[in-house]
Image (cartoon, helix red, strand yellow):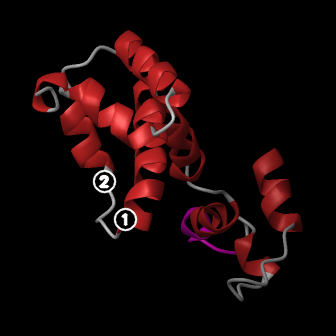
Amino acid sequence: MRAIQFFSDLSIPATGIPREIITPTSNPNWSVLSQEVYNIYVKHISTHIKHAAINVRQTERGELMKYFCDKLNSSRKMDGLQPISMGRMGRMLEKIPTKDLYYLKKVCDDAQNFSKKFWFELNPEKYKK
């Protein structure tokens, strides 16, 4: 009975349906019309879920990868090189455990040249003569 009272008191400017048509006693298609009114005024559940899904996907490892990309891309931009994408960064760091990434971040932050130290720490044999 509360739903009938709610729908009968409701004015529906968005649909153009007069309030008299929505009452169950005046119209045999009342259930169809009430469903239309419900769909207009109630938001779909996915509008609430999408925002939560974005926050769930953020991880420590992803934040470190983004940090390395930002630091390296700033120096690469000055040298005229292409920026490193998150996909490429993920491929380079895929075999390194997360705890070692924190060590790599600390070592590179303490170095004079972040980029040079980063590439040396990833593959030291390549730079030893």
Residue highlighted by disc 2? 85
Q: Return the x and y of residue 78 as percentages of the image width and height.
A: 44, 66
Q: Return the x and y of residue 76 as percentages of the image width and height.
A: 37, 59
Q: Secondary structure at mark 1?
A: helix
Q: Nearer the viewer, residue 82 or 15?
A: 82
Q: Residues within 10 Å of mark 2 (few under 14, many from 20)?
A: few
Q: Nearer the viewer, residue 86 or 33?
A: 86
Q: Is residue 4 above or below residue 39?
A: above
Residue at horizontal 11%, vertical 24%?
125
Q: Return the x and y of residue 37 as percentages of the image width and height.
A: 66, 67
The quarter holding residue 7 reads: bottom right
Label number found at residue 57: none
Q: Residues within 10 Å of mark 1 (few under 14, many from 20)?
A: few
Total numbered badges shown on the rendered structure:
2
Residue highlighted by disc 1? 79
Residue at horizontal 56%, vertical 38%?
52
Q: Is residue 101 above or below residue 72?
A: above
Read off the magenta span: 26-33
Residue at horizontal 40%, vertical 26%?
61
Q: Nearer the viewer, residue 94 or 31?
A: 94
Q: Secondary structure at mark 2?
A: loop
Residue at horizontal 45%, vertical 31%?
64
Q: Nearer the viewer, mark 2 or mark 1?
A: 1
Question: Identity of the amino acid at label 1?
Answer: Asp
The quarter holding residue 103 reads: top left
Magenta segment includes 29? yes
Question: Identity of the amino acid at label 2?
Answer: Ser
